[in-house]
Image (cartoon, rainbow, N blue to C red):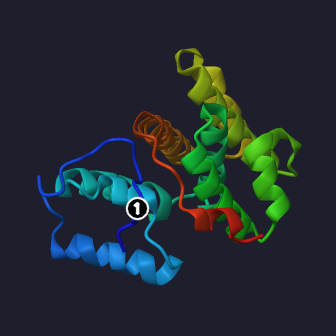
Amino acid sequence: MKSSKPIIALDMPTSEEPLNNNQKRYLEICDEKLGFVPNVLQAYAWNSSKFDGFTNMYNDLMLAPSGLTKLEREMIAVVVSSANGCYYCLAAHGAAVRELSEDPKLGEQMLMNYRTAKLTLKQRAALDFAYKLTLNPNEIDEPDRQKLRDAGWVDREIWDIAAVASFFNMSNRMSGAIDNRPNDEYHSMAR
Protein backbone atom coordinates (compact mmCIF):
# COMPACT_ATOMS: atom_id res chain seq x y z
CA MET A 1 0.00 0.00 0.00
CA LYS A 2 2.73 2.50 0.89
CA SER A 3 4.22 4.29 -2.09
CA SER A 4 7.91 3.69 -2.75
CA LYS A 5 8.46 7.33 -3.71
CA PRO A 6 7.93 10.26 -1.35
CA ILE A 7 4.36 11.54 -1.43
CA ILE A 8 5.14 14.84 0.29
CA ALA A 9 8.17 17.11 0.59
CA LEU A 10 8.36 16.75 4.39
CA ASP A 11 10.03 13.88 6.23
CA MET A 12 7.43 13.12 8.87
CA PRO A 13 7.95 10.67 11.76
CA THR A 14 6.38 7.28 11.12
CA SER A 15 5.75 6.29 14.69
CA GLU A 16 4.62 9.48 16.41
CA GLU A 17 1.05 8.22 16.66
CA PRO A 18 0.60 5.12 14.48
CA LEU A 19 -2.69 4.31 12.80
CA ASN A 20 -5.02 1.97 14.66
CA ASN A 21 -6.60 -1.11 13.10
CA ASN A 22 -9.75 0.74 12.00
CA GLN A 23 -7.68 3.38 10.25
CA LYS A 24 -5.54 0.73 8.56
CA ARG A 25 -8.75 -0.97 7.41
CA TYR A 26 -9.95 2.37 6.01
CA LEU A 27 -6.83 2.49 3.83
CA GLU A 28 -7.34 -1.13 2.77
CA ILE A 29 -10.93 -0.36 1.72
CA CYS A 30 -9.69 2.61 -0.34
CA ASP A 31 -7.15 0.33 -2.01
CA GLU A 32 -9.84 -2.28 -2.74
CA LYS A 33 -12.33 0.28 -4.14
CA LEU A 34 -9.93 2.50 -6.08
CA GLY A 35 -7.03 0.19 -6.75
CA PHE A 36 -4.71 2.52 -4.83
CA VAL A 37 -4.52 4.52 -1.62
CA PRO A 38 -4.90 8.24 -2.29
CA ASN A 39 -1.70 10.09 -1.47
CA VAL A 40 -3.65 12.62 0.59
CA LEU A 41 -4.54 9.84 3.01
CA GLN A 42 -0.98 8.58 3.11
CA ALA A 43 0.15 12.12 3.85
CA TYR A 44 -1.96 12.14 7.03
CA ALA A 45 -1.12 8.55 8.01
CA TRP A 46 1.88 9.57 10.12
CA ASN A 47 -0.44 10.68 12.92
CA SER A 48 -3.60 8.86 13.99
CA SER A 49 -5.34 11.96 15.37
CA LYS A 50 -4.63 14.07 12.29
CA PHE A 51 -5.72 11.20 10.03
CA ASP A 52 -9.03 10.96 11.91
CA GLY A 53 -9.54 14.71 11.82
CA PHE A 54 -9.06 14.84 8.06
CA THR A 55 -11.04 11.71 7.17
CA ASN A 56 -13.91 12.44 9.55
CA MET A 57 -14.39 15.94 8.16
CA TYR A 58 -14.03 14.75 4.55
CA ASN A 59 -16.53 11.91 5.04
CA ASP A 60 -19.02 14.19 6.76
CA LEU A 61 -18.85 16.89 4.09
CA MET A 62 -18.66 14.69 1.02
CA LEU A 63 -20.70 11.60 1.95
CA ALA A 64 -23.24 12.53 4.63
CA PRO A 65 -26.84 13.31 3.72
CA SER A 66 -27.18 16.77 2.18
CA GLY A 67 -29.31 18.71 -0.26
CA LEU A 68 -26.18 18.80 -2.41
CA THR A 69 -25.52 15.79 -4.60
CA LYS A 70 -22.16 14.04 -4.48
CA LEU A 71 -21.46 15.49 -7.93
CA GLU A 72 -22.27 19.03 -6.78
CA ARG A 73 -19.93 18.64 -3.81
CA GLU A 74 -17.17 17.40 -6.12
CA MET A 75 -17.83 20.31 -8.48
CA ILE A 76 -17.35 22.71 -5.56
CA ALA A 77 -14.09 20.95 -4.69
CA VAL A 78 -12.84 21.40 -8.25
CA VAL A 79 -13.89 25.05 -8.56
CA VAL A 80 -12.17 25.91 -5.27
CA SER A 81 -9.09 23.93 -6.29
CA SER A 82 -9.03 25.62 -9.68
CA ALA A 83 -9.14 29.05 -8.05
CA ASN A 84 -6.29 27.98 -5.76
CA GLY A 85 -4.29 26.13 -8.43
CA CYS A 86 -4.14 22.97 -6.30
CA TYR A 87 -2.61 20.27 -8.50
CA TYR A 88 -3.53 17.41 -6.17
CA CYS A 89 -7.19 18.28 -5.80
CA LEU A 90 -7.64 19.20 -9.45
CA ALA A 91 -6.40 15.76 -10.48
CA ALA A 92 -8.30 13.82 -7.79
CA HIS A 93 -11.60 15.69 -7.78
CA GLY A 94 -11.54 16.36 -11.51
CA ALA A 95 -11.50 12.56 -11.90
CA ALA A 96 -14.44 12.32 -9.50
CA VAL A 97 -16.46 14.87 -11.52
CA ARG A 98 -15.70 12.95 -14.73
CA GLU A 99 -16.76 9.69 -13.11
CA LEU A 100 -19.90 10.90 -11.34
CA SER A 101 -21.15 12.94 -14.30
CA GLU A 102 -20.07 10.34 -16.87
CA ASP A 103 -18.93 13.39 -18.83
CA PRO A 104 -15.18 13.92 -19.31
CA LYS A 105 -15.88 17.31 -20.89
CA LEU A 106 -17.64 18.54 -17.75
CA GLY A 107 -14.66 17.46 -15.68
CA GLU A 108 -12.33 19.47 -17.89
CA GLN A 109 -14.62 22.50 -17.85
CA MET A 110 -14.71 22.45 -14.06
CA LEU A 111 -10.90 22.41 -14.02
CA MET A 112 -10.38 25.20 -16.54
CA ASN A 113 -13.41 27.50 -16.28
CA TYR A 114 -16.64 26.27 -14.73
CA ARG A 115 -18.50 29.16 -16.37
CA THR A 116 -18.21 27.38 -19.75
CA ALA A 117 -20.14 24.34 -18.52
CA LYS A 118 -23.84 23.68 -19.00
CA LEU A 119 -25.00 23.98 -15.41
CA THR A 120 -28.34 24.57 -13.80
CA LEU A 121 -28.85 28.07 -12.42
CA LYS A 122 -28.82 26.51 -8.96
CA GLN A 123 -25.44 24.83 -9.55
CA ARG A 124 -23.98 27.98 -11.08
CA ALA A 125 -25.03 30.00 -8.04
CA ALA A 126 -23.36 27.50 -5.70
CA LEU A 127 -20.14 27.50 -7.72
CA ASP A 128 -20.09 31.31 -7.99
CA PHE A 129 -20.46 31.49 -4.19
CA ALA A 130 -17.68 28.92 -3.62
CA TYR A 131 -15.40 30.77 -6.03
CA LYS A 132 -15.99 34.12 -4.34
CA LEU A 133 -15.59 32.56 -0.90
CA THR A 134 -12.22 31.22 -2.04
CA LEU A 135 -10.82 34.37 -3.58
CA ASN A 136 -12.56 37.11 -1.58
CA PRO A 137 -13.95 35.67 1.66
CA ASN A 138 -14.03 39.10 3.27
CA GLU A 139 -16.52 40.25 0.62
CA ILE A 140 -19.17 37.60 1.33
CA ASP A 141 -22.30 39.26 2.68
CA GLU A 142 -26.06 38.86 2.79
CA PRO A 143 -26.67 39.55 -0.92
CA ASP A 144 -24.39 36.58 -1.73
CA ARG A 145 -26.42 34.29 0.51
CA GLN A 146 -29.63 35.70 -0.93
CA LYS A 147 -28.47 34.85 -4.47
CA LEU A 148 -28.18 31.25 -3.32
CA ARG A 149 -31.67 31.34 -1.80
CA ASP A 150 -33.07 32.92 -4.97
CA ALA A 151 -31.50 30.08 -6.98
CA GLY A 152 -33.30 27.52 -4.80
CA TRP A 153 -30.83 26.67 -2.04
CA VAL A 154 -32.08 26.64 1.55
CA ASP A 155 -29.97 27.83 4.46
CA ARG A 156 -28.98 24.29 5.51
CA GLU A 157 -27.63 23.69 2.00
CA ILE A 158 -25.85 27.06 2.00
CA TRP A 159 -24.06 25.85 5.14
CA ASP A 160 -22.97 22.73 3.22
CA ILE A 161 -21.78 24.76 0.21
CA ALA A 162 -19.71 26.97 2.51
CA ALA A 163 -18.37 24.00 4.50
CA VAL A 164 -17.28 22.07 1.40
CA ALA A 165 -15.64 25.17 -0.08
CA SER A 166 -13.91 25.95 3.23
CA PHE A 167 -12.63 22.40 3.67
CA PHE A 168 -11.10 22.36 0.21
CA ASN A 169 -9.49 25.75 0.76
CA MET A 170 -7.78 24.23 3.81
CA SER A 171 -6.91 21.04 1.96
CA ASN A 172 -5.54 22.97 -1.03
CA ARG A 173 -3.30 25.00 1.21
CA MET A 174 -1.98 21.91 3.00
CA SER A 175 -1.34 20.14 -0.31
CA GLY A 176 0.62 23.13 -1.54
CA ALA A 177 2.55 23.55 1.69
CA ILE A 178 3.69 19.92 1.81
CA ASP A 179 3.88 19.41 -1.98
CA ASN A 180 1.42 16.52 -1.91
CA ARG A 181 1.26 15.09 -5.43
CA PRO A 182 -1.73 13.24 -6.88
CA ASN A 183 -1.57 9.54 -7.57
CA ASP A 184 -0.78 8.86 -11.23
CA GLU A 185 -3.98 6.82 -11.51
CA TYR A 186 -6.16 9.92 -11.24
CA HIS A 187 -4.99 11.23 -14.60
CA SER A 188 -6.50 8.38 -16.59
CA MET A 189 -9.68 7.81 -14.59
CA ALA A 190 -13.11 8.22 -16.25
CA ARG A 191 -11.80 9.43 -19.59
On screen, residue 110 versus residue 38, left or right, reads right
Which residue shows up at 18% across the image and 56% down it? 14
Considering every residue shown, the one lying at the far top of the view is: 139
Mark yes or no: residue 53 visible. Answer: yes
Residue 31 at x, y percent in the picture: 43, 78
On screen, residue 54 versus residue 15, left or right, reads right
Picture mark count: 1
Q: Is residue 167 above or below residue 66?
A: above
Q: Which residue is mark 1?
A: 59
Q: Nearer the viewer, residue 117 or 31?
A: 31
Considering every residue shown, the one lying at the far front of the view is: 4
Q: Is residue 96 above or below residue 112?
A: below
Residue 129 at x, y percent in the picture: 65, 33
Which of the image's four quarters has the N terminus? Answer: bottom left
Q: Nearer the viewer, residue 177 or 99?
A: 177
Mark yes or no: residue 77 visible. Answer: no
Which of the image's four quarters has the C terminus? Answer: bottom right
Residue 30 at x, y percent in the picture: 42, 75
Considering every residue shown, the one lying at the far left of the view is: 16
Q: Amino acid at mark 1?
A: Asn
Q: Give neighbour class at mark 1: few <14, some 14-19, many 20+ (Cα, 10 Å).
A: few
Which residue shows up at 43% across the image and 37% down it? 170
Q: Is residue 175 above or below residue 188?
A: above
On screen, residue 38 versus residue 44, left or right, reads right
Q: Secondary structure at mark 1?
A: helix
Which residue shows up at 12% across the image and 57% down it? 15
